Amino acid sequence: MSRAVAGPEIERLIQLLARLPGLGPRSARRVALHLVKRKDQLLGPLAGAMAEAAAKIVICPECGNVDTIVPCTICQDARRDPSILCVVEEVGDLWALERAAVINARYHVLGGTLSPLDGVGPEDLNIAKLVERARAPEVKEILLALNATVEGQSTAHYLMDRLADCGVTVSRLAHGVPVGGELDYLDEGTLAAAIKARKTL
Amino acid sequence: MSRAVAGPEIERLIQLLARLPGLGPRSARRVALHLVKRKDQLLGPLAGAMAEAAAKIVICPECGNVDTIVPCTICQDARRDPSILCVVEEVGDLWALERAAVINARYHVLGGTLSPLDGVGPEDLNIAKLVERARAPEVKEILLALNATVEGQSTAHYLMDRLADCGVTVSRLAHGVPVGGELDYLDEGTLAAAIKARKTL
């Protein structure tokens, strides 16, 4: 702001809020105003929740998930099928699969994808630990649930090579028409994959 | 989420973030993930800034601005022209005028607009204090810088009546073509106002 309107505390709050994904300077001001107008109902509780999260959050040394206990809730869950490890790029992908509740496996979070142009090599991702976990006798299948992007798929290829001598089946998600999707709006790559993997009725 | 993926601290953080304006459940999760991945650089400092703001923020009893000192920075600023009071709906409007740095007056924040359908009457807004301030001998002009919406304008009409016997000039912002605006994209109301208030060159 060109002139000091509010105290430095509010200015600092706006600056930090502007660093959140999807918020620019304008929406950061709007959020800050929303917060200061709801000091007791929202700003205070949110400050508390953030402080608590900041104090308690740890990265699971086993799978790379974020949680407040070590090992994480999922790694500790005895009802999970120990024979499948589902490899994802980011914790957000893990959350998406858990929301869908479509697999009862444990996970392994890579922390990104290989990207030589950005200087991200195998040693920057959580890959050594994955190979170690894949060698465990109870693990039979590694499901590479990576994004269907160029980066995701090239990372999957690399992992296939790395996991070749671990004595596990390596699988990937199926490609095809998304459920509810209209053919008219799909790209050629998806249509080609859907035709190639067509099912006999 | 259908299953407990992360600890209750993270779930609670997501729930509170989802109550911020412009964030839904999905973007709240994205923000939460962004925060927990940047625990020391962003989550901790933001928690601190919010706690400090929550502890220090007060509504200025004079003008209704939010600040950390009483009276607020603007009310205390001796370089402000004491003869003009600029009436705005919300603190965000005050910030917008201050960013533009186009008026060196003091402000008066109403806290909303009259809206009988929503049960917002004159007693719910910061109007009694405005009338009191308007009667101060140094105040010569009340500039109603309200939104050019139906609610803003009906509130302005109401304030004109209330301020009629305060011995002050009551003014409003000019209507017209926004600077940089193209006629083709303007509504009839704006064009009519711009023609009616046309200036001789």
Image: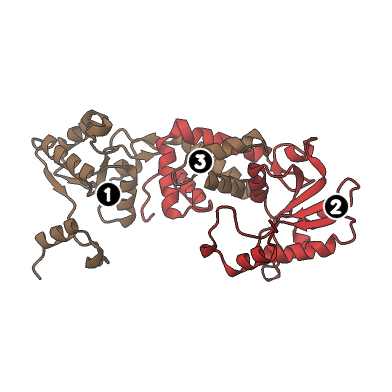
Chain colours: A brown, B red
Amino acid, disc 3: Ala
Give A1 or B176, whichever is nearer the viewer. B176
Distance from the alpha carbon under mark 2 to that under mark 3: 37 Å
Mark 3 belongs to chain: A
How far apart in space, not on screen, are marks 1 and 3 (Cα)?
Answer: 41 Å
State how many labels appear: 3
Residue with the mark numbered 1: A79
Q: Which mark is residue A18?
A: 3
Residue drawn where x is 75% and y is 50% of the image: B86
Looking at the rendered structure, whether the residues under marks 1 and 2 are on a common chain is answered as no
Q: In the displayed structure, would residue A164 be above or below residue A26?
A: above
Residue A68 in view of the camera: no
Who is closer to the viewer here, B25 or A71?
Answer: B25
Local crowd size for mark 1, using a 10 Å CA cut-off: few (<14), some (14–19), many (≥20): few
The foreground one among B141 and B3 is: B141
- Give the residue number, with chain letter if any, for mark 2: B134
